[in-house]
Amino acid sequence: MPLLLLMVWEAVCRGGLVSPIMLPSPSAITIKWVEWLRSGELLVDVLGSLGRVTGGFLLGAGLALPLGLFMGASPRTYEYFNPIIQVLRPIPPIAWIPMSILWFGLGNPPAIFLISLGAFFPVLMNTISGVQNVDSIYLRAARNLGAGRSAMFRRVILPAATPYILTGIRIGIGTAFIVVIVSEMIAVNNGLGYRILEAREFMWSDKIIAGMVTIGLLGLAIDQVMNALNTYLLRWHRGLDS
Amino acid sequence: MDYISISNLSKTFEGSDCTVPALQDINLSLSKGEFVCLLGPSGCGKSTLLNAIAGFIQPSRGEIVVNGQPVREPGPDRGVVFQEYAIFPWMTVARNIAFGLEIKGASTAEIRERVDVLLETLGLSEFRDRFPKDLSGGMRQRVAIARLLAIDSPIMLMDEPFGALDALTRRTLQDELLRIWRESGKTILFVTHSIEESLYLSTRIVVMTYRPGTIKRNQIVTMLHPRDPAGAEFNELKRELGHLVMEEQERHTHDEMKPV
Ligand SMILES: Nc1ncnc2c1ncn2[C@@H]1O[C@H](COP(=O)(O)OP(=O)(O)O)[C@@H](O)[C@H]1O
Ligand SMILES: [Mg+2]
């Protein structure tokens, strides 16, 4: 099916039914992509984007995870932070762009800031529900066996909440990916988002699509890694299949 | 000197639309090394009493003293085996058993040795690195028991631990529990709604009434272990206790038929 689609697409372009600017052919895109790769620029762009995603994600998730654990475990902490979180959460990271440039200038810092915002909320919300949904029988059992606060967090609450947390991480990475592309269109001069915007200036449709495909493939690769991580971390978990 | 002493214990659950008098004026003492069964139909407050001794719920009135200390919170001196399988699903069998020892800060070598012995004792050796999801209900309760034996709780509180098991597995585990009890000299409080189970296991049966939960009968069982469930004395007692439990069961049923 994908092969058939590609063939039809190629035929439509070759037949001159559409202009190469509106829709370049798959072969033209591939050629452009290889050229991009050969120049070494593709690697710089991919690493640039991945670096920002990684940095922003680690920052956002790194703050969200402990906060989520505390908010989930303590109703008082929850009451304290919840109002502000409910107000900030619906604001899309894109809306933070102007302020982030004012605060952090241009370059990587505003991009990292925006990405961390994008990753923060999904991880936070899922961690909170994960902790709130820990079966109280495990808390009782652990207390009964003498577990103190720290052991309770590390050895009971955290692992019990892992299925939720991983879902949050997955959504967080997805958001981080969206935000990295957008933030590269405004603040930096490399990365896949920047390259796509640059190609648009010159109406290089083939390069735009080559960039888009690269994003798609990167997303797929990250998803595969997440899947493997999921399977490993949740190897104890009774899945839906059993 | 009583090992566990419960005096004038009452517990009322305050719901939004009703209050349930779960326990009322319970007076009960256990000596060291006793194997006491709490017997009664479901809803008569057996779990509530056990959870109060464990320190999970605070009584409305009265006091529980264990080994001279009033109960305020849960502690490893009163190990609990829960009705639901409460072993940690994210830990392997060996890690589950090691948990309490790790909390106590035992040395790695000591933990290893203790865990090995317990795996052997409970016939779990081949499951050491398995996760609970791969274990049958009987195996899971073996792990739960091993987890308590690891921290060597002098008191074991067991809430219908074998209730969900098939008859054969249940008998095997009952026999093993008796062996452990005999060898360790632990004090066991065992909740069940099965008359036969209470007669097979315990040195004393405490029959409870339904709503409010009070003590209806304190029945000492003198038969020697292993007991023969087909024997005359066994069945004599079974018939007698059967009447007592049935009276409470009927009140329970009557309650359930009442329009809310
Ligand atoms: N947390 C609770 N809130 C309100 N009612 C409860 C609660 N726990 C138990 N009860 C009620 O108290 C009574 C005794 O419960 P329980 O001790 O669990 O009985 P048993 O273990 O003998 O089946 C029941 O009628 C039950 O509905
Ligand atoms: Mg119960």
Image (tube, rainbow, N blue to C red):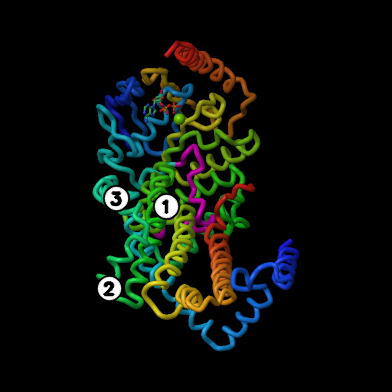
Query: Disc 2 on helix, strand or loop?
Result: helix
Front residue (pair A88, A188): A188
User: Any atom of ligand 1 within 8 Å of the CB at mark 1?
Assistant: no
Front residue (pair B226, A213): A213
Q: Which residue is mark 1?
A: A126
- Give the extent of the magenta segment: B81-103
The numbered disc on residue A104 is 2
- For disc 2, the chain is A
Q: Earlier in the sequence, mark 3 or mark 1?
A: 3
- For disc 1, the chain is A
Front residue (pair B118, A131): A131
User: Which x, y percent locates residue B106?
Assistant: 39, 62
**Amino acid type of the residue that numbered disc 1 sits on in the rendered structure:** Asn
Query: Disc 3 on helix, strand or loop?
Result: helix
Q: Quadrant of the C terminus of chain B?
A: top left
Query: Disc 1 on helix, strand or loop?
Result: helix
Q: Residue at 37% x, 50% y: name it.
A: A128
Front residue (pair B168, B89): B89
